Amino acid sequence: MVREKELFLVRLMKATDVIIIAASFFIAYFITLIIRDIFDLGPLAYAEGGIFYFYLRHLWLIMITIPAWIGFMSLDNVYQNFRTKIYLEILWKVFRTGLFSVLLLGSGVFLLKMVLTSRLYVGIFAATAFLGLALSKAVWRWILDYTYRQGINLVNILIVGTGARALEFINVVREHANWGLKIVGLVDDDPKLLGKKIVDYEVIGRITDIPRLIREFVVDRVIFVVPRLWLNRIEDAIFYCEREGIQTAVSVDLYKPKLAKLHQTDFAGIPLIVYQTSIAKEWQLFFKRLLDVLIAIIALILLSPVMIVSALLIKFTSKGPVFFRQVRCGLNGRKFTLYKFRSMYAGSEVRQKELSKQNEMDGPVFKIKHDPRVTSVGRYMRKLSIDELPQLFNVLKGDMSLVGPRPPIPTEVEMYKSWQRRRLSMKPGLTCIWQVSGRNKIDFDQWMEMDLQYIDNFSLWKDLKILFRTVFVVLTGYGAA
């Protein structure tokens, strides 16, 4: 749960440091040439053959220094509990390990008899690499502190149990608040504890109340830390969380989930069994987010003329705002404001009840092929999905992804069956399998099954294929209302 995120963060920081140290070799080359020219120190050895020849001659230094510096920082615990260290402590460790690395580099120069290697170049490289690493650590600290203060990527956990082991778990969470964990509340079967606070957290229900609590609160994980005598009580709650796509963790391996993938992990030494309902790994979600931001920015730039013309047409052909805003449900029920170009006449939402008999979709979804509330301009925008383009801003904000289950409105979610709520276990998308497979020609249950199929078989390659298919669907208007 947390260990995987921390491990991924460490690997990401190490990869960044490798790039910085490698880049410092290149930067130091040009700085050395400038300094030698200013102070008339003569030509730099091996530089007459150009930068690539110079680096070919110094390849062994690069191969020694990069793993050495990264290794020394790992041994000096620069990366371990990075979020909890003060910046000056990190800076001192980077400087200290840098000295050891430069000494090792000097030893390499001596052993390899690289008598022509410029000591000035080595010193400039060391200074450049240190400044780069120091800046990198400052940026990482700012990013992590900012995301924590803004409540970004917070993991909301519901803890079941109030015994000794549960209290130990709660205290670890409290001691490491900057890990991005937030305790929603506690669950205990003792009726006397209901409503009371334990270590500043309220007991908000019993085990049988978990289905209600998941609906009333935004819950990302349910952690069962209960006595062994209670294990027979939590089976139904685990299966319920599994159906709804909520990750659970218990202290022993006892149940075989039907959908979720089971793996063992630990939380600061406390063993846990995790029932993970999504196969998406942290590195996949990281690159998925990078692609979201990159493609959304490019799309907004390329499509800005279309969006400007659309906005003007909406403004001059019908009364009302250019944009339509609506509250939708995102990851695990998080509510956010979705943006679209207004394609209906102002105030059309209040007419939905009188048109309910004409609904062409089953389930808690309202769709009419020839909706009388749609404006003439809106009909063309819907045909080409132009009305959806402002959702690219939702993608940039992080409320949505480019690919994922379409975000439902809260009233629809309230009417979901338990198994259908599992579609909320992945961030909603601008397009999805349903979007490129006929849309309004598909019944509601099949639509839900398509979303679950996407979640259960997630891959970055499939995301790219759905995006390419979306381009075809948009250009042809296939399945649009």
Image (cartoon, rainbow, N blue to C red):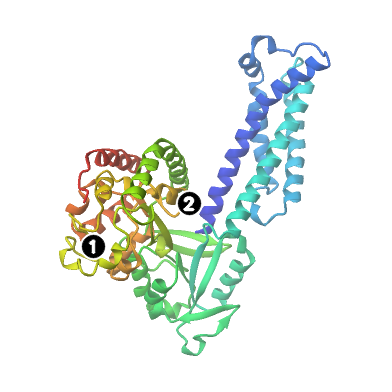
Residue positioned 17% across, 52% down in the render: 441
Q: Which residue is mark 2?
A: 397
Residue 310 or 246: which is nearer the viewer? 310
Q: Which residue is mark 1?
A: 366
Residue 188 position within the rendered picture, expressed as x and y whole percent measured from the top left: 47, 81
Residue 137 or 431: which is nearer the viewer? 431
Tell me if residue 27 can be seen: yes
Identity, as a three-letter code, of the amino acid under mark 1: Phe
Q: Residue furthest bottom?
A: 192
Tell me if residue 256 can be seen: no
Mark 1, Cα crowd under 10 Å, few <14 / some 14-19 / many 20+, is some
Residue 317 or 401: which is nearer the viewer? 317
Residue 265 position within the rendered picture, expressed as x and y whole percent measured from the top left: 49, 59
Identity, as a three-letter code, of the amino acid under mark 2: Lys
Q: Which mark is residue 200?
A: none
| Image vertical order of residue 178 relative to residue 473, above or below | below
Left or right placement of residue 191 versus residue 22 in this view: left
Q: Nearer the viewer, mark 1 or mark 2?
A: 1
Label 1 sits on a secondary structure element that is loop
Mark 2, Cα crowd under 10 Å, few <14 / some 14-19 / many 20+, is few
Mark nearer the N terminus (1 vs 2)? 1
| Image vertical order of residue 412 relative to residue 191, above or below | above
| Image vertical order of residue 248 relative to residue 144, above or below | below
Left or right placement of residue 241 versus residue 14 in this view: left
Label 2 sits on a secondary structure element that is helix
Rendered image quadrant of residue 133: top right
